[in-house]
Image: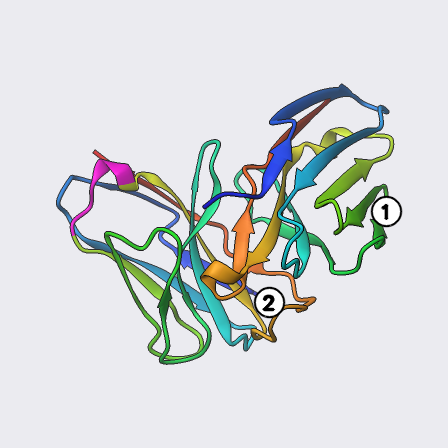
Amino acid sequence: NAGVTQTPKFQVLKTGQSMTLQCAQDMNHNSMYWYRQDPGMGLRLIYYSASEGTTDKGEVPNGYNVSRLNKREFSLRLESAAPSQTSVYFCATKPRDRGRRSLDGYTFGSGTRLTVV
Amino acid sequence: ILNVEQSPQSLHVQEGDSTNFTCSFPSSNFYALHWYRWETAKSPEALFVMTLNGDEKKKGRISATLNTKEGYSYLYIKGSQPEDSATYLCASPRREYGNKLVFGAGTILRVKS
């Protein structure tokens, strides 16, 4: 009963390096999201995917790319890491986007703590 | 855009104290209000999803109320315990992002035994 699994849990990158954060869910949820958490700023949406094969930008997409290859997996890629991307990254899922009055809470992964030096 | 506000930023209480904190959000085009509990080194966990004005939800010692007309929600914890120590996040779907959740910065609660 894994739910939402994120890898890696910790990562240190040098400025300019690239990496991909992986997220996989076994809940058969349609919607998947990537958030970043910075002190005093709440969770900010980077990208989301309403269903397999579709992705859309969130509030802070610059410097990131995503890929939703199948229903289970939604990856986040940093092509050229910058110190400003030091953060905790959370993947989240929801059964489906049913519009405004959805009663579904999000299910979160345990986070990836990324430091860019 | 961060127009979901939470107060206070942090709170320290003694075991057994009851406490409450506030989430304010734009009352126009209200869709829903979510509360999450986030313990250090763990995943945020959904507590409540509320949609109706006047709604009140309860889970054990934790309860929440919702006022959509004035744009606020209160989270109450009765008889706080050390295991209640966590960051409490509220969030509301925003039309600007296809009704995806916009989170407040959270209230950090520390309960001393």
Residue at 84%, 24% in the rendered image: B17
Q: Horizontal and vertical percent for residue A7?
A: 37, 56
Q: Quadrant of residue A64?
A: bottom left
Magenta region: A80-84
Q: Main secondary structure of the magenta part?
A: loop
In the rendered image, which residue does mark 1 sit on?
Answer: B60
Which class describes the residues within 10 Å of circle 2: few (<14), some (14-19), or many (20+)? few
Which class describes the residues within 10 Å of circle 1: few (<14), some (14-19), or many (20+)? few
Where disc 1 sits, the SS reads: loop
Residue at 54%, 56% in the rendered image: B101
Q: Quadrant of residue B40?
A: top right
Judge by depth and name the residue closer to the eye, B56 or A111: B56
Instruction: Write down the chain letter for disc 2.
Output: A
The amino acid on which the numbered mark 1 sits, given as a three-letter code, is Gly
Q: Is residue B113 visible?
A: no
How is the structure coloured here? rainbow
Residue at 66%, 66% in the rendered image: A104
Judge by depth and name the residue closer to the eye, A15 or A103: A103
Residue A41: numbered disc: none
Rounded to the nearest angstrom, the CA distance separating label 2 from label 1 is: 24 Å
Q: Quadrant of residue A102?
A: bottom right
Residue A1: numbered disc: 2
Judge by depth and name the residue closer to the eye, A84 or A110: A84
Q: Is residue B101 visible?
A: yes
The amino acid on which the numbered mark 2 sits, given as a three-letter code, is Asn
B85 with respect to A86 (left or right): right
* Up/down of A69 relative to B48, above or below: below
Where disc 2 sits, the SS reads: loop
**Residue A81 falls inside the magenta stretch:** yes
Q: Horizontal and vertical percent for residue B56?
A: 85, 52
